[in-house]
Image (tube, grey):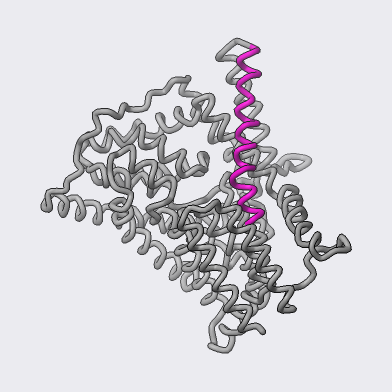
Amino acid sequence: MLVTGTVISLIFIAIAAWLLLKKYNPQAVLLVIGLTMLVVAMILGTSGELIAVSTGNVVFDFFRVVVNTFTGSLSRFGFMIMAIGGYVAYMNHIKASEALVYVSMKPMSLFKKYPYIAAIAVIPIGQILFVTIPSAAGLGLLLAASILPVLVSIGISRLTAVSIISACTVFDMGPSSANTAKAAELAEISTINYFITHQLPLIIPMTILLMVVYFFTSRYFDKKDVAAGKSTFGGLTDIKELKAEVPLIYAILPMLPLVLLIVFSPYLGIFTSPPITLDTTTAMVTSLFVAMLFELVRKKSLKQFFDGVQAFWDGMGKIFATVVTLIVCAEIFSMGLINLGFVDALVQGSTQLGFSGGIIGILIAILVFLAAMLMGSGNAAFFSFGPLVPNIAKQFGMSTSELITPIQLSASIGRTASPIAGVIIAISQIAGVSPFELVKRNLIPMGSIMVFMILYNYFIL
């Protein structure tokens, strides 16, 4: 029966991947296929207890699964993600995100004599920005409006410039990331703990490698394109450099939640009596009120001040409609895989072949990377397969945190190598280049850091 369930699981995974590749609605795909897998698992007799308290009818029980998953996700971390989305939307509304990008990119003028060094110097700056602006497409568009013309003007091709911009979104990290929140929840640790103790030790050396690889591959591809008559140098006269429309002090506002979380965490050693324990949601709401005060002082209009707060609520609603619903539907999808015995088959098969838990972690990381390339979404890939990790870790006697980080990062790495990812399409259109050509530029760097991450995480750390 376990073999039958595994084969059926693989068939459903293939169907889901095909539908997502054809741009069917991801929430609907994952929800319908997840519930279908639960029905099949019940017919095969492999399903466990779907809900703690039955409605008295098996049909209603299946739909109660959806309700319980929604309420459980909202109470655990759904509201936190919505608060993050609301704060990011408010930062965009008051132009604080643009001020941060404007300030961060001003030092680039120092590297005009060394264009490729200037290009790779954008990567760590952009990744720091990505911690506070956790939307790949949003940050990509901001950088396309600000740094893209600068790089092109100092001698970088448009393809190189947009590949560098896409590299700034290669790691979903920090307390503001939905993938980080989900990984931390699966590992049963705080988001700031996960960020500092699990993500940063991997991301710092990976970023250094990424810069080195991009330096050499960018020069190689630019020379190759020039020789082939396919140069993408110049041609950005229609794009204007981003101007700061608000006081530059607004640049601190997108960083404020992260600063609060670090300052009032055990890692910095700020002790108070009684000790202050700050969670991500509280940091976001606190920062919102600070930002509102900034706006009140700047606009001196109570009506404009109150009207502007609507952007926060709109942002929360948008995140619920996109990210939170995706999380819930992906949880039901992974629940279907678990009930069909997919995890048990992985563990038993690996045990018989002499594989360790680490090898299984590597296989899932590669699977998530490929899924993200197919789906064009790091969230969809990780939310679908991430929930499988705690069960695998438990059966191998490992902690979830040992396995989850490379799997979580694989999702955003795969997204950067996907020609249908929102960020890739958006910045390609602005630069006037093909998303497929952009992905070709990204494949070597993304493949390099995937290999490095696996080796470094499982054999060095």
Q: Is residue 203 visible?
A: no
Which residue is the extreme one toward the top? 300
Residue 3 on the magenta segment = no
**Image point (76%, 53%), residue name:** 67
Give the answer, above or below, for where 319 lies relative to 4. Answer: above
Task: Name the spot of residue 249 as percent of width and height, x first.
Answer: 50, 24
Position of 296 compared to 157: left or right?
Answer: right
Residue 319 on the magenta segment = yes
| Foreground pick, 369 / 87 | 369
Task: Name the spot of residue 460 as percent of width and height, x first.
Answer: 46, 70
Task: Name the spot of residue 3 as percent of width and height, x first.
Answer: 61, 84
Position of 233 compared to 188: left or right?
Answer: left
Task: Quarter of the image for the N terminus: give it.
Answer: bottom right
- Displayed quadrant of residue 291: top right
**Image point (59%, 85%), residue name:** 351
Count of marks overlaid on the render? 0
Task: Name the spot of residue 18 as percent of width and height, x first.
Answer: 48, 62
* Bounds of the magenta segment: 302-329
User: What's the magenta bit mostly, secondary-structure-wise?
Assistant: helix
- Displayed quadrant of residue 117: top left
Q: Is residue 80 visible?
A: yes
**Image point (57%, 89%), residue name:** 352
